[in-house]
Every structure is written in C-alpha cells, then in structure tokens.
Amino acid sequence: MSFMKARCLFQATLLLMSVLAVTACGFHLRQSAALPPSLQRIHLTVSGGGEFPRMLSRALETSGVTVEDNSGPGIAELHVPMAAFGTDSLSNGGYVRITEYSVHYQVKFDVTGHDGQSLVPPQTINMSREYSYDAANTVGNASQVEQIQHSLNDDMVQAILFRLQAAGKHGLAVPASAASTH
C-alpha cells in the first residue's frame, strides 16, 4: 500500500512540474484574435492560391469576422499582394552535396477601410524553417517541405491576426470619424 501511495504522489508531482514548466516558458494555447469593430467585415484579396487564403479566411471567421465575397459599404479590404515561398541551401556535405536547406516565406499585406483610408499600413512578414536533406529519401524530403510550408502558413496566419489585433489596440485600425468621437 505504501508503494502505491508513493507512486501516485510521484506521478502527481511529475504532472504538476510538467504543467508548471510549460506555463513558465510562456506557452499559451492559441485563441482567436480580438479584432476591432472596423475589421468585423472584411473582403479578402490574396494573390495566388493554395491553402494560405483558406487558412486566413477560416482564422478571420473564427475571430468573429465576416469574410465578404465582394467589397462594399462598411467592408474593410485586406490585401495580400504577395505570399511566396523560397528555398536556400545552407550547408554542403562531402563532394558538394547539399545537406541542409532553409524554406523562407514572405507575405506582404495591408488593410484599407471601406472609405479607402489606410487602417493598417503595408506590412511584410518573413519567416523561415531549416531542414536536413537526405539524398537517399527524396520522397520523405518532399513531404518534409510540405509539412514545413503548412506550418509556416499556420504561423503566418496567426502573425497577421496578431498584427491586426495590435493595430486595433493601438488605434491604427479605427477610422478617423470613429476616433474623433472618443
């Protein structure tokens, strides 16, 4: 009986230490961004295709934004004229074989109000991830790059939402007519 109590106490202590370690390092579950009223209806224009526009639209909707099919009265415009991946080699192995790569992702965006006024000035966000290349497993490498790109898309969507949220908190995303009434 004593062994069982000690084991349970050890497991509880280990669980408590794990929870404290995770919270102490700054880890927080992702939650939807609190966007300002001027961004509650958005028309999204993204150059190119892929999963990024769908992920951004879904994240905006999760944050309580209505993503409109067309622009119009009372609808802000979120323009993403560039969302591009690039790859660079980082290191070479023997016989000039490339053994490490870096996947770069650059997205440019801005937000204008329904009246054409800039709510969020043009922004550029750069992200990258590194990975090792295995010449014997080219199928695995393609899969690894796809996973990295998916991860970068997810992180980029969150970065854009947090910038929109910050713009609202600092008064950048409030139209001049609404700002003068406060």
Image: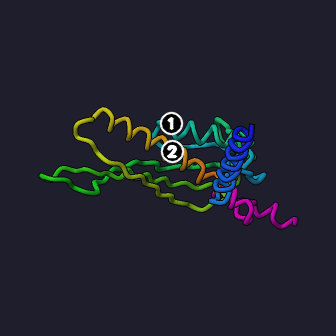
Q: Is residue 65 visible?
A: no
Q: Which of the 4 image quarters holds residue 170?
A: bottom right
Identified at 12% across, 52% down, the residue is 95
Q: Report whether 144 appears left or right of 180.
A: left
Q: What residue type is labelled 2?
A: Asn
- Of all residues, the one furthest to the front in this rendering is 2
The spot of residue 70 in percent (x, y) is 64, 37
The spot of residue 175 in percent (x, y) is 75, 60
Q: Name the residue under label 1.
A: 51
Asked if 50 appears above or below 131 in the picture, the reply is above
Q: Do callouts 1 and 2 mark residues in contact (Cβ within 8 Å)?
A: yes
Q: How crowded is mark 1: few (under 14 residues within 10 Å), some or many (20 or more)?
A: few
Q: What residue type is labelled 1?
A: Glu
In front of the other: 177 or 50: 50
Magenta residues, start to end? 163-182
Residue 2 numbered mark, or none: none
Identified at 75% across, 60% down, the residue is 174
Q: Mark 2 points at which residue?
A: 153
The spot of residue 107 in percent (x, y) is 49, 53
Q: Is residue 36 visible?
A: yes
Asked if 86 appears above or below 54 in the picture, the reply is below
